[in-house]
Image (cartoon, rainbow, N blue to C red):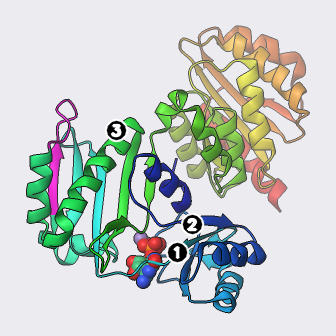
Amino acid sequence: MDLFEYQGKQYFSKYGIPVSLGDIADTVDEAVAVADRIGYPVVVKAQVQVGGRGKAGGVKLASNHEEARLHATNILGLDIKGHVVHRLWIEHASEISREYYASFTLDRGAKAHLCMLSAKGGVDIEQVVEEDPEAIARLYINPLDGVARADLERLVVEAAIDEEARAGTVEILERLYTCYIEGDADLVEINPLILTPEGKVHALDAKVTLDDDAAFRHPEWEEFALSQEGDPREIMAREKGLNYVGLEGSVGIIANGAGLAMSTLDVVNQVGGSAANFLDCGGGADADLLADALEVINSDAAVKAILINIFGGIVRCDEVAKGVLIAIDRVGLTTPIVIRLDGTNAPLAREILAPHLSDRIIMETTMIGAARRAAEIANERSK
Ligand code: GDP
Ligand code: MN
């Protein structure tokens, strides 16, 4: 889960990383009130989960009440690379002497944590990687050892951080590492990390990606989860604990196992259909789960046919068949559904489904046959 900048800053603050005083605002009036309260100059910042807000006009300095109103008016509702701004973060503006880059992330290849630090911050770090890779200093950290102060002291020199900023940067990196480890993040990034004319080092931006698998030990993440924006189908699926990715097509797909789900997508496309989603309902595939899955797919108006493709390995097809019937009933489904069940107890499953078959509940015995049928129905109903 990615956090918005303001959430990332709240998260950093908890670990003692210095950030500017600020608050969120969802309307122009709120924004002006926040600006008046924290004192000018302020910076008005679009809260969208995409980089390069500055260049897109989503970060503006305001030196008084009128400017704050003007910028808030312009930025709210702005479309930044497909992300519409619904919320602003207003913070007291900082004076900047230098802009640096700092991050911790997991390098899976190296089986270690990786700290990256550069004196070339403020700009797109991917661009620095390409044009001047030497400008980024790297430190690999064995997760069992943790990070040693001496290593960070070497790193700031290697990264050519200005002398007066080194001590402050080391301190922030130590806290950032704690925040990354104890906070269960996959990525923490500060770009820019600034040096002020008074010699203070300070986080001006915050990018945090949390490790969703650690959510169980962070009840406080609930609040972050609620504010997530994005595909409403994906939000609904996430709430139900389904592994779902929304796509553009018209055939809704439910399969058990990620591999089968992906090959079902391929087969649907191969026979001239288009997949509306990826949905792996896992090994269980009980009635409740199937009903949840059908509910998510049913909420998508673009879906004109549903294809259920289950291979019974551990899961028994007769249980799945019963589940499908209960689920169709519970959801009140009207979209035609093509079912292909194979594997353990498949003949029994077919017997269970047989009395219920109609032009809306269709059974096919092969994967390609089922895909073809679902694609035909979807294409016909899309006309
Ligand atoms: P991003 O473009 O989405 O990465 O947004 P940032 O929060 O990194 O802001 C972009 C740029 O705006 C920064 O690199 C700074 O140059 C500038 N900026 C942001 N906050 C301030 C501030 O408080 N004072 C000044 N002078 N510039 C700022
Ligand atoms: Mn930034």
**Location of residue 44 with respect to 320 vertically, above or below:** below
Q: Is residue 364 visible?
A: no
- Residue at image x 71%, y 25%? 289
User: Is 351 or 95 nearer to us in this picture?
Assistant: 95
SS state under label 2: strand
> Which label was assigned to residue 181?
3
> Residue visible at 60% across and 72% down?
38
- Residue range in magenta is 137-148
User: Looking at the picture, which amino acid does disc 3 mark?
Assistant: Ile
Q: Is residue 12 left or right of residue 330?
A: left
Among numbered discs 1 and 3, the one appearing first in the sequence: 1
| Residue position marked by numbered label 2 in the rendering | 22
Magenta-colored stretch includes residue 141: yes
> Does the rendering let one see residue 322?
yes
Q: CA distance from mark 2 to mark 1?
A: 6 Å
x, y percent for residue 49: 54, 63
- Amino acid of disc 2: Gly
Q: For this view, does 159 lie left or right of residue 52?
A: left
Task: Mark 1 and mark 3 in contact? Answer it, CB < 8 Å.
Answer: no
Kindly check if marks 2 and 1 are in contact, taking CB atoms under 8 A apart as contact.
yes
Q: Which structural element holds mark 1?
A: strand
Residue carrying label 1? 92
CB of mark 3 within 8 Å of CB of mark 2? no
At x 25%, y 53%, the residue is 171
Is 214 left or right of 338, judged from the image as shown? left
**Mark 2 residue crowding within 10 angstroms, few (<14) / some (14–19) / many (20+):** many
